Amino acid sequence: MAKMIFVNLPVADVAAATAFYAAIGMTKDARFSNDVASAMVWSDTISFLLLDHAYFSTFTAKRIVDAHDSSEVLLCLSQESRDAVDAITDAALAAGGTEPRAVQDHGFMYGRTFTDLDGHIFEPMFMDMEAAMAAMGQARPD
């Protein structure tokens, strides 16, 4: 079995969060979704599990932070091009997300930032690895 990652996120409204994640290109896996949880597939090895606060609380005794006011993690999503970075960010904004910081363009790396409806921070980015290695004075390992 391939190594996989399941990102569990507390959300205030599972249906609204599901619609948001669908708008940015994820697919709902109905097998693992119900009224308190929604499994949104990003790739063959990465899924986001959107859990309502009460259900999320069954997995931890820690307080759920308000991601609009506090931050615990930044989720970087690699993209195939600058246009793909813009497309996912624009889709997030159209679906009700926000863009809390300016575009980051370092030549070899291009990124934007958006938040989902619950304030979780995503950073879609594209990196030209050859240009990055040249900028850092390193040869790319084979």
Image (cartoon, rainbow, N blue to C red):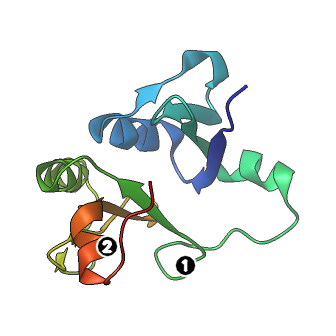
Left or right, 83 with reference to 121: left
| Residue 72 visible (yes or no) | yes
x%, y% of residue 55? 75, 45
Which of the two residues, 114 or 51, is positioned nearer the viewer here? 114
Q: Quadrant of residue 134?
A: bottom left
Are the residues tagged 1 and 2 within 8 Å (C-beta)?
Answer: no
Circle 1 residue:
71
Q: Quadrant of residue 98?
A: bottom left
* Three-letter amino acid code at the position of disc 2: Met
Q: Residues within 10 Å of mark 1 (few under 14, many from 20)?
A: few
Q: Is residue 99 visible?
A: no
Q: Which mark is residue 27?
A: none
Q: Nearer the viewer, residue 90 or 94?
A: 90
> Which callout, 1 or 2, points to the residue nearer the camera?
2
Q: Image quadrant for the C terminus?
A: bottom left
Residue 26 sits in quarter: top left
Cα–Cα span, label 1 and label 2: 31 Å
The type of residue carrying mark 1 is: Ser
Question: Crowdedness of circle 2 by 10 Å Cα count: few (<14), some, many (20+)?
Answer: some
Q: What residue is drawn where x is 14% and y is 75%?
A: 107
Q: Residue at x 84, y 50 (%)?
A: 58
Measured as percent of width and height from the top left, residue 23 is found at 28, 38
The residue singled out by tag 2 in the image is 133
